[in-house]
Amino acid sequence: MYIHERPRAAGPILRFSKVKKSFGDKTVLHDISFDIYPGELCGLIGQSGAGKTTLLRTLIGYYELDSGSILYKGTNITNKIQFIRTIFGFTTQESCFYEDLTLMQNLTYFGSMYGLSKLEIAKKSEQLLKLVELWEDRNLLARQLSGGMQRRLDLAIGMIHDPEILILDEPTSGLDPILRKSMWNLIKKINRLGVTIIMSSHLLDEMEHLCQDVAMIKNGTILVKGSPNQLKSYYSKHQEVWIESYPGNYKKLIDEIKKRNIAVFYPRHEGTKLIFYTPNTYSVLRAIPLAASASNEGLSTLKIEKPTLNEVFEALTNYNK
Amino acid sequence: MINIIQVLIKLKTIFVKNIKRLMESKISASLILFGPLILIFLLGLAFQSSGFFGVTIGVYSPNYNEVSQNIISAMQDTDFTIIKEESSDTCINGVKEARTHLCMQFPEKFEAGRLAFYVDYSRLNLVYAIISKINSEIGTISENISMGITQDLLNIIGDSSAQLTSSEETINQLKLNAIALKIELYNTSYAIRNMNITQGSEIITSLTDNSSTLLTDVTNVKDSLVLIKSSLESTKTDSISASKNQVESQLASINTAQTNQGCTPENSRDLTPYLASENLLNEMMASPNPTCAILFTMRLNLEDQSSQLDSIETDLDVLIDYMSSLHTGMSDLETTIYSSAQVAKQNINSLDDSKMLLSQKLEAMALATDTSIASFDIMNEQLSVITNQFEQLSITDPGTVIKPIKTFIKPLSSKKINTLDIIYPSIIVMVLMFVGLLMGNILVMREKTSRAYFRNLIIPVKDWVFILGTYLTTAIIALTQVAIIIIIGTVFFGTHLDFNVFRITPILFFAVIIFSSIGMIIGYLTSSEETSVMAAIILTLIFLLFSNMIIPIETMEETIGIFARLTPFNISEMILRRSLVFGSEISSTNPLTAIIFTIQLILLVIGVWYSHKYSNKHKK
């Protein structure tokens, strides 16, 4: 589902059309359809096992599709594996390179495997290593790099053949906040170079921060796709209400709130908290203490906020359970 | 063209990457560079000679004689250390306790016993080498002993030949005697067959005829006798009895008259003496009572007549008995005459039969003599053949008998080959196997477990380029090591093998492809590096165990032996040995072996492809 399709200058660079993939009896991708536009930084949000990685790996030809098609600038490239591999760059959360080779050796090897000349490799390697700020460390063995540096090296290797589309599978997974921020900057920098980026993550603040468009995926289905602001404004018709009370009989509390004609959406427990969405912000402020008293709950926390993308996602995924 | 160049560049890149990764570890680099150097130096130093340094042999003999001393001296000359043991048990225990490598026990008498070896078969290869060496030493001594024995044997054969010739003459004489005997037998048979026994027969026939007449006469006499006897019995019954009755009646009348006349003995007188005299009447009248006298006299006469009649009757009885006995005698005579005639007839018949039988027997004897003569001929021919064979027996030299086929080992190469040369092909194939199999395996496993594995799967390079890259890396490393071994062997240890690069390179290349394929398949199919390396090592050990390196394949169970011959190690080693030792081209390989080798190669390459596919699929 697209929320307020934005006007585009050009047609999609990539179009997924009813893409389906199963492993044995388990269907991992259910008729996935969405478009990616040139220069876009598109994020795939989903919980672990939602199908993000499978979708990305299907895109680069690692997995064969069961049905559906992938169009590149309007041309069906579903079965053109070798071609697909030249237009995509890929980085993973594991960092795919030879740890016992130096940075330059890794870039030289993969550059050569992409058919680049020595000169091209040398030029591109320097350019990329400088971009990812590893030029000074080019002669170190890859295993000698820190986690963040390894991610940057992986990014450089993924771009050695100048791909039109860069796929980043959980690029900041396992990095500390500082390194994550540095990685975000790098991704932004690359995107600004005109590279279309499809990025998966389960860190929604990252998506909110980086991506122009976000597709939310759950159980192999795209729940919604749109810009983070669009999504938030769509869901910001409701306020997010956080309640913490004692002894925590939230079912009774919800019933008491509802009795007072307050609309309650997507109620859920999160730790000792009760979270739900409501459009009646002011009414709810009055109703909650009364409802708590009626249900013998000792109210300790009451917070009302506009939802983040994370909260939108959580609401959506829970709603779709 | 561009594609080929691109592929070649990619292959070079893969090779360089593999080498860099291997060399990244100093230990790995050292092993790759110095491994073959160390191996060839050690082997070169160890196998430069073909002696038996350090081999100790325990010997025991109840009595050391010249032969046993000669054998011991010969072995001492061949670098063996000899320990003379005090007893048979000590000698055997020496092997068990590993004091000695072999126990050799001499018999008390060589003519009656055997030279016994007690060996520790757990060290089979050493045992074979020692026994082979000892056998060659003992063989020389044994040959000398055999020479004397064989000379005696030849002398006996010569004497026998002479005796056979004289036997031939004897048999000829025997044959002549038999012929004479045969003639004699035929003659005798003829004579007997023609012997006239008719005269005797006629006599007997006449006698028989006469006896018939005689028999008739006797029968007639018998009949007469019956008649006579009957007549006599009738006389006795009729006449004598009537007369006696008459007399008795007269006597009764007289008695009555006497009684009536009152006759007494006193008035009765016997007038009988006067009956024929003239005085009868006077006497009668002179008697007291003439009537009584007459009666008395009559009575006396009647009594006399009666007793005469009794006597006649008795005589008649005797006569009748006599007639009966005469009749019986005649019957006996008749029987005797008849049986005598029959016996005579039978005798004549028997005599004729005997004559024929005798004649036939004699003829049979003559025929048997013929057979004997034929046998004498056969014996003579056989003796002639034997005599001819003996005469044709041109062997006068005992050495020809002991070794009718004189053998000597002549190397096909004019150069002298040492132990190192002999094991060189095996070493080369062993290096190819270890490097190929382990390197193929390690490269695949390192690639599989590498973090770059996934990226290699999504770059625009075909799978076969990676496989080829692994083959290339393995082949270059293995062939480089073999080249090092060959160069060092040639330069420092002076091997005499024919290292023709153009001839052996294809063999080495095919071998390394086979071994690296096996290693790669193991790598693709196993999930952990440890398991993979373990499997590769086990396989190399199996190839080694089922080769001639440890124990000869020929000593294995037949079926296992056949399969063992077909292992890539043994086929490669065999083809390489032929090339290095005899200079054989790979094209001259036995077609069946070449086919099996090619099939193995093709199957393994296909196996690599599918196991690679399986591994990728599994990884996904």
Image: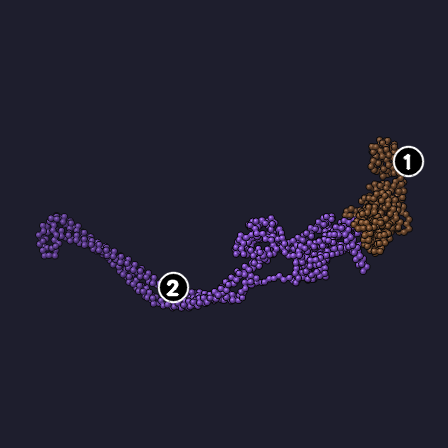
**Same subunit under labels 2 and 1?**
no
Q: Viewer-proximal residue, A179 or B560? A: A179
From mark 2 to mark 1, how far is it between C-alphas? Answer: 166 Å
Q: Viewer-proximal residue, B392 or B363? A: B392
Estimate the x, y position of residue B619 in percent, counting from the top left: 77, 49
Q: Is residue B183 left or right of residue B240?
A: right
Tell me, for residue A282, which label it has, or none.
1
Crowd rating for badge 1 (residues with CA inside 10 Å; few <14, some 14–19, many 20+): few
Per the image, label 2 sits on a secondary structure element best described as helix
Looking at the image, is A264 positioned above or below residue A14? above
Q: Please tell me in which quadrant of the rendered image residue A258 appears.
A: top right
Looking at the image, is B236 positioned above or below residue B348? above
In the image, what residue occupies the spot 89% across and 41% down? A236
Q: Is residue B168 left or right of residue A143?
A: left
Give the residue type that dot 1 points to.
Tyr
Q: Quadrant of the N terminus of chain B?
A: bottom right
Q: Please tell me in which quadrant of the rendered image residue B404 appears.
A: bottom right
Tell me, for residue B354, which label it has, or none.
2
In the image, what residue occupies the spot 69% across and 50% down? B538
Q: Viewer-proximal residue, B205 or B156? A: B156
Please state which of the two labelled residues, at mark 2 or mark 1, is closer to the viewer.
1
* Chain appearing in purple on the rendered image: B
Estimate the x, y position of residue A150 in percent, counting from the top left: 82, 47
The chain letter for the residue carrying disc 1 is A
**Chain A painted colour:** brown
Per the image, label 1 sits on a secondary structure element best described as helix
Q: Is residue B553 left or right of residue B391?
A: right
Give the residue type that dot 2 points to.
Ser
